[in-house]
Image: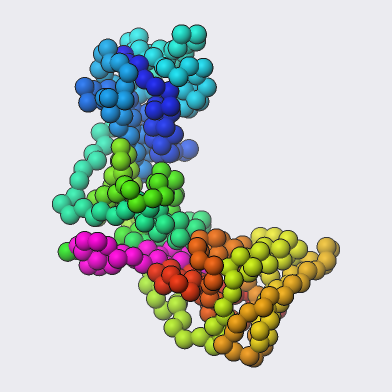
């Protein structure tokens, strides 16, 4: 294997592919990146056996190919080596089956490589009925929900995002049992099969980082019983699915409310953020809210520090007083994904779920549970 490539083209591919390198893999060769140079271009592949990413650099983006071939290069060093190379043009030359020289006009590295024959075969195959979605839309779906996945392995299914497709309706749900986020969109083309899968949170978040924010490009999803393959531009991203049936969350979501409160998103978010500075419990960051007709008072206190209080003007459907407490961290993370200026807080009582919605966007619903402070 011998070729010449532009530093920035290779660096972008390496940044994406190294997302699949696990920190606790028990198979040493999976700490490497498989470089495969053919007449069509350079393929970079990395996997931790659960997540696999392949990036294809087209032949026209490679400055010169002297000899095709394959090698598995240690990921621990290759990314930083390329990042810190002093030249924009980088040369690769295999010295033998287990050594590669990476060099510019003024410096060089000689790296030991893994045995290419030990690298496992990983199939990235297409399904019979792929689903196409705009990249910007998928990025919005993931960012609007994945923040609510659980980080606790006690209930493994809750560490993933539940993706459901029925006809032309796609629904994405995430919950850690203390909060929930649900986003619905309508697909351009309906599918014949019903889809109900759980994608690991770590995987879907890594894929979201690769996606552009516009809808100029499309993502093609190939869904199987135990895995999903995303194809986006020159990237193939395949992850195993979590096994089991995701819990039905519909019965957690109230449909009638005693209080419908109109708020300005920025004003409310800033007030909660300021109040959380003096929250007693820094793990949960509990703040208290008093709703009294057209005034909302947000407060927090810590015995060793002091207390804070501020008021917001609101529009409420109920003039009765209500006092409720919640995690400011959970509330701020929910508010962060909303885009519209005006929002609704939908509340029943101090021990029932709080719903957060945009007034304009009906496709996104967020829920957090209140906290009892006595």
Provide residue 229's location: percent of width, then percent of height. 28, 47
Q: Residue at x 83, y 66 (%)?
A: 306
Q: Is residue 63 shown in magenta?
A: no
- The residue nearer to you, when weighing 208 against 61, is 61
Compared with 50, 156 (above or below) is below
Q: Residue at x 35, y 24 (%)?
A: 72
- For the N terminus, the quadrant is top left
- The residue nearer to you, when weighing 318 against 280, is 318
- The residue nearer to you, when weighing 178 against 53, is 53
Q: Residue at x 46, y 27 (%)?
A: 79
Q: Is residue 258 left or right of residue 226?
A: right
Provide residue 292's location: percent of width, then percent of height. 68, 85
Q: Is residue 308 left or right of residue 267?
A: right
Instruction: Give the extent of the magenta segment.
Output: 164-191
Q: Residue at x 49, y 21 (%)?
A: 81
Q: Is residue 264 left or right of residue 226?
A: right
Provide residue 119's location: percent of width, then percent of height. 30, 28
Q: Is residue 310 left or right of residue 303?
A: left
Provide residue 9's location: percent of width, then percent of height. 39, 28
- For the C terminus, the quadrant is bottom right
Q: Main secondary structure of the magenta part?
A: strand
Compared with 120, 231 (above or below) is below
- Residue 95 visible? The answer is yes
- Residue 276 figure quarter: bottom right
């Amino acid at each position: 294997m011998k070729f010449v490539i532009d530093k920035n083209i290779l660096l972008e591919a390496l940044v994406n592919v190294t997302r699949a390198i696990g920190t606790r893999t028990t198979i040493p060769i999976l700490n490497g990146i498989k470089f495969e140079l053919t007449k069509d271009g350079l393929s970079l592949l990395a996997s931790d056996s659960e997540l696999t990413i392949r990036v294809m650099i087209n032949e026209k983006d490679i400055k010169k190919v002297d000899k095709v071939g394959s090698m598995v290069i240690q990921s621990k060093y290759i990314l930083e080596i390329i990042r810190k190379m002093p030249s924009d043009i980088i040369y690769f030359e295999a010295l033998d089956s287990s050594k590669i020289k990476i060099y510019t006009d003024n410096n060089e590295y000689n790296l030991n490589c893994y045995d290419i024959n030990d690298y496992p075969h990983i199939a990235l195959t297409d399904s019979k009925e792929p689903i196409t979605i705009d990249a910007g839309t998928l990025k919005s779906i993931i960012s609007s929900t994945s923040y609510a996945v659980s980080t606790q392995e006690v209930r493994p299914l809750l560490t993933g995002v539940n993706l459901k497709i029925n006809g032309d309706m796609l629904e994405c749900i995430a919950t850690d049992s203390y909060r929930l986020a649900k986003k619905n969109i309508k697909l351009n083309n309906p599918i014949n099969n019903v889809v109900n899968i759980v994608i690991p949170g770590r995987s879907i978040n890594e894929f979201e980082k690769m996606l552009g924010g516009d809808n100029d490009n499309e993502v093609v999803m190939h869904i199987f019983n135990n895995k999903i393959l995303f194809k986006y531009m020159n990237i193939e991203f395949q992850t195993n699915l979590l096994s089991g049936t995701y819990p039905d969350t519909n019965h957690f979501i109230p449909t009638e409310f005693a209080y419908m409160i109109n708020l300005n998103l920025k004003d409310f978010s800033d007030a909660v953020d300021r109040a959380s500075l003096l929250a007693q419990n820094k793990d949960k960051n509990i703040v208290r809210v008093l709703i009294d007709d057209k005034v909302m008072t947000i407060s927090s206190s810590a015995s060793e520090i002091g207390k804070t209080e501020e008021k917001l003007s609101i529009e409420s459907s109920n003039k009765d007083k209500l006092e409720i407490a919640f995690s400011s961290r959970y509330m701020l993370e929910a508010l962060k994904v909303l885009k519209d200026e005006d929002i609704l807080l939908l509340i029943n009582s101090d021990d029932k779920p709080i719903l957060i919605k945009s007034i304009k966007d009906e496709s996104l619903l967020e829920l957090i549970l209140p906290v009892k402070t006595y």
